[in-house]
Image: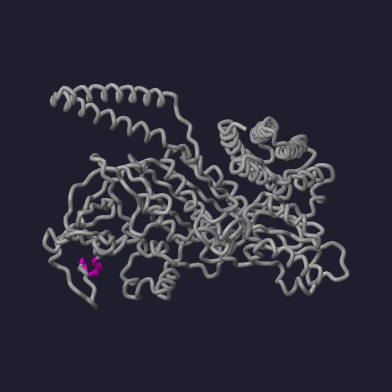
Amino acid sequence: MNDQYLDAFVRESEEEITKLNNSLLALETDPGDEAAMDQIFRTAHTLKGNFGAMGFEDASDLAHAIEDLLDEMRQGGMAVTPEVMDLIFAGVDQIEAIVHEIEEHGEATVDTDETVAELRAVLEEGVESADGAPTATDGQGDVAAGGGGTSAAAVADLDLDPDDVGGTLVQAEIDVGDSDMAGVDAMLAMEAVEEVFDVVATDPQREAIEDGDYEETFSLFLDAEDLGRVDAELDSVGKIATADVTDVSDALGSDAAAGSDPGEADDHAVDEIKSVRVDVDQLDDLHGLVEQLVTSRIKLRRSVEQADLDAAGETLSELDKITANLQNTVMDMRLIPLKKVVGKFPRMVRDLARELDKEVAFEIEGEDIELDRTILTEISDPLMHIIRNSLDHGIEAPDEREAAGKPRQGTVTLRASRERDHVIIEVEDDGAGLDVEHIQQQAEEQGVRSADELEAMDDSAIYDLIFHPGFSTATEVTDVSGRGVGMDVVHDTVTQLDGSVSVDSTPGEGTTVSLRLPVTMAIVKVLFVQVGGEEYGVPIKNVDEITRTTDVKTINGREVIKHNDEIYPVVELAETFDVPGETTSNGDGMLVRIRESERQVALRCDAVNAQEEVVVKPLEGILSGTPGLSGTAVLGDGNIVHILDVVTL
């Protein structure tokens, strides 16, 4: 299949799924919303037709079953209830999982038969036939069933370290059939599987399985390369009657296990933005600028050949203007509306509110505000975590709100606005607000600040302590608060994007978290420093002050400087990067003191050179993740300069 057509199909399907989710939410809120119902049918029909046209019949059948069930609602034959909507949303999740699999592998192996059968059963016999309709799907999109509960829950209970799994984590639900010796047959089956695969965990425990202490099935979690091979290999194991195989990699580390990596699997994760829509006028501008660029290149070559320096200088001035316009045009083409990311958030809020037994209205303002594609992708996880916090810790339970004289339904608002070359994104809730005394107590207990320091801080500074690494005010880790990233990672992510984050709160009235972000970030202004025969770039946003080394002191064998009663250790760049050559050409050198908010250090170099705007390219391949380096920049003379990452130096 043509990759170009497939990519267009995937992109359109993703947009239609987001539309479908949000229309379904509108219908659930107001079952009489005819506009939402009409939009749902248009979207479901489009999905059904597109899947059928591309040959993905299982997905088309699923979309058709959802369409038929919704038609019954429209005709008044079935009420719009949370239980029925749970089943419909589970079907939409499975469609989304199919689209992701098509994007990754060019085909879909997700079995939709069970979900289609449940939808048809509800259509024919009513919601009771669903026997407790599922509210979520597993990592592959299959509606989880069987003795071990949902795959995600089973994986979370195992407390597996993601680093222990080298390939794909596969859950194989094993049925050994009718047996007089269930434990023995299960043991033989496990041993046969272990001859082929690395079994990293079992559910229930291995001893229980070998004692026959399990229901009809038990689960083996395998470290494998791909799902197809597991299916084929298990089919050949004689001791296994049936094996239901599911890819559960996405569930690994996604639940309440503390310390999970940011961005680890999440049912509502926002994928990297892989396509943008470009206005025809922008394409015309780009084409015109390229024509000017070609013309100037010819003129410059002719001037050089004729040794006409005056003409060459004029042409270079022209090139400066053309490249500046070219840069602005391309930057504009990278801008994407915020709704590309936040479009999935209403569905996430709905599911979390159901999980927490809370009533929550979610509002979005300014979703047409545009940001650079990279920035949008990076802030999706932090925004999701802030919203989760609002639901889990901010918005109170309905009875609690009512007792406090508030509406039973809480409100979370995501608001975006543009301020010149920055965008302000606020997440505001009308919940309980932050407890200053509780934050002070936790900060002192966790050693974040001393009692005297806390006493001298105003409320605003105390609120900002929630961004301190490892700091938590939660008395317990819930399924919601334990997922994803922490507020310290929110702060770090926003800061690395050259932005800032702050929090404001009023006890009993609510909390607002504000993110201030640049619109674009491709061009970075750096300070060039000389170390021996090497040159490095330090982002200007990280630099607080440049001084000579006269104030350096030695404490406990380490060189430091003092600024505003704070101690800044001195980092020798020559030693850090093992720079060859003479490194004392400027006396004892120069010090570049880094902003305290980034890292409390001072960098020693031989000399400080110029400042310049550069295009920073991140390190890739084996160099990716090199401590102390964030990327490289190509200078005008063709030389490559490494850009320092002051946090990991």
Please say if 617 is above or below 403. Answer: above
Q: Residue at x 69, y 38 (%)?
A: 32
Residue 642 drawn at (x, y percent): 30, 51
In the image, 575: left or right of 176? Answer: left
Q: Is residue 34 visible?
A: no
* Region of the chain picked out in magenta, as a range: 563-570
Please say if 9 is above or below 116. Answer: above
Residue 419 drawn at (x, y percent): 35, 41
Q: Residue at x 68, y 52 (%)?
A: 229
In the image, 130: left or right of 437? Answer: right
Identify the main secondary structure in magenta. strand
Q: Considering depth in this image, is 637 or 408 the residue closer to the camera?
A: 637
In the rendered image, the quadrant that contains the N terminus is top right
In the image, 338: left or right of 138? Answer: left
Residue 323 drawn at (x, y percent): 29, 31
Please say if 359 is above or below 16. Answer: below
Q: Considering depth in this image, is 94 or 106 the residue closer to the camera?
A: 106
Q: Residue at x 56, y 53 (%)?
A: 410
In the rendered image, the quadrant that contains the C terminus is bottom left
Residue closest to the far bottom: 556
Q: Is residue 278 visible?
A: yes
| Residue 566 falls within the magenta-colored stretch | yes
Q: Quadrant of residue 320?
A: top left
Q: How many marks?
A: 0
